[in-house]
Image (cartoon, grey):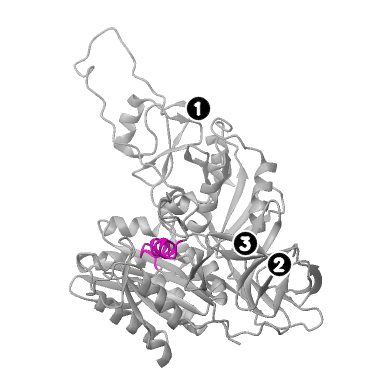
Amino acid sequence: MKQENIRNVAIIAHVDHGKTTLVDRLLWASHVFRDNQQVEERVLDSNDQERERGITILSKNISITYKDVKINVIDTPGHADFGGEVERVLNMADGALLIVDAYEGPKPQTRFVLSHALERGLRIVVVVNKIDRPNADPEGAVDKVFDLMVELGATDEQLDFPVVYASAVNGYARLSPDDDNMDMVPLLDTILQEVPCPDVDPTAPLALQVSTVDHSSYEGRIGVGRLHSGTIHEKEQVLVVKPDGAERTAQIRKVYTFENLGKAEVPEAAAGDIVAVIGIEDADIGDIITDPNAPQTMDPIAVEEPTMAIVFEASTSPLVGREGDIVGARQLKERLLREKESNISMRINELEDKSGIEVAGRGVLHLSVLMETMRREGFEFQVGRPRVVYKMEGGQKLEPIEEATVDVPNDYAGKAIEVMGTAGGIMEDMASDESMTHLTFRIPTRGTMGLKTRILNATHGEAVLFHHFKEYGPYSGEMMGRKNGGMIAMSTGKAVAYALDTLQERGRLFVGPGDECYEGMIVGESAKEGDMVVNVEKTKNLGNQRSSSADKAIQLTPPVTFTLEEALEYIEDDELVEVTPQSIRLRKRLLSATDRKKAAKR
């Protein structure tokens, strides 16, 4: 039976191709907001960091109603570090909007999500966005999408895809780039015509598979998924079948469907709709909620394994507690275990010796988003260098391998290849046009640490680098760490301009005059190999004679400031990043120079 009044659509787009802005325009077009209502732009990027970074971090569900049809829109992250969300949420969709930039065409991360959508047999509607750009080439973008879909093995039916041309910023969609339509109606009509409605049986036994998990401090775990068959009622007794085959009964306390930007509690929901259920205490990805009298079976959902881990510890810095309110190890542990409740794509466990909590995720960005959230909540903590998660298989050590793509101007292609080679990258493909070279590499995840900065430096900021996890492969041997040593402060106190003036001749500084420093803190990078202990508090000796250089003004180069990702990629194994609400500091694990010498002799 076809549920004609429902459409389930996922949105696939590369970072910054206008996905969230397009959803804003669809919400306006379906009159979710009043005409005079003040609404922030990019309403789906509800999280502060999503707004600041301009990326989607969490998959979200909303719905819009158009011509009495409910369109469930499933937002998917465009960044590969959050790919853990993507594969699961595609389970809930029957079709997908593939948004591509009219100038850039499909990009590497579009490829990653699109391949999964094609495997699932979803109906693809191509939306060529930003057709108002001066250098836009909408027809060229469509040709590139066609070539990509052929390469990914799309069926003849999938290759006969409908195309809508849009400018999300200006709020219009068109069936031809040259017509003069100025609203979003053609896109909404295309969704109703092209995306198949769910073909399900509301009278069959209940079958719901949990695709994403939310957490509420009031209600506990919330399982979200598509109702594949049957009808679900509140207060209903159900059977929960875990991915490992374990079964138990539970009662559904509440049933929600998605309405506009929020959830609406309903007494029952029928097959084909996307629902959120409360009452399954340990709801997890892949759980099947079914009728106890006629249990249904469904294909399992794979949750990707994390590839990078980092250890969180309570801060042992001499400056602890000056900038943050929450500094205790117990509070840190409680906060991270709370994160474990709702963040399924991370693995969070306490170390055996209780010295810290190990958090494993899909990449440095994935881990740094959690750290940034915690520092904004007032936490102070320290983290070690990220390490990749190895596997042993048949006595062989395996490490995560990524596929990296670099788009670089032809003049700098040689430099980019050289940098990738030093990071352990093996070139698999190279294609050039008049101005740009497209390079594809196979590279160990270890080699991607700090790679973006090195590529940008080598290509004068012109290269664009993306990488995502591909597979586990044989361990490729030791890799060279950072060449330059650090400047390590010898005492605790404030940095003085006079001391920094002499130090800046010997390398790059990370602190400015007046910054609080402490023994063992990394205050700069030496131009040579090996660490150098320095005095940042040194002041000028004042005699009773005037010297010819006495009045020379000190001119300091502005210090290097690190983002969280840059700091994590910069440090070595014997170093830590100290994270507070106001500062990101680098330090040695052993603060005392004497302790470091003893450790080096061992």
26 inside magenta stretch: yes
According to the picture, the residue beneath numbered tag 1 turns out to be: 492
Tell me the crowding category of disc 3: few under 14, some 14 to 19, or many 20 or more residues within 10 angstroms, Cα based: few
- Along the polypeptide, which appears first: circle 2 or circle 1? 2
Q: Over which residues does the magenta segment extend?
A: 14-31
- Lateral position of residue 101 relative to residue 81, left or right: left
Q: How many marks?
A: 3
According to the picture, the residue beneath numbered tag 3 turns out to be: 264
10 inside magenta stretch: no
- The picture places residue 81, in percent across and down from the top left corner, at 49, 63
The type of residue carrying mark 2 is Pro
Question: Main structural element of the magenta stretch: helix, strand or loop?
Answer: helix
Q: Is residue 291 visible?
A: yes
Q: Nearer the viewer, residue 39 or 237?
A: 39
> Eyeballing the image, is 374 above or below 394?
above
According to the picture, the residue beneath numbered tag 2 turns out to be: 267
Helix, strand or loop under label 1:
loop
> Eyeballing the image, is 331 above or below 257?
above
Q: Are marks 3 and 1 in contact (CB under 8 Å)?
A: no
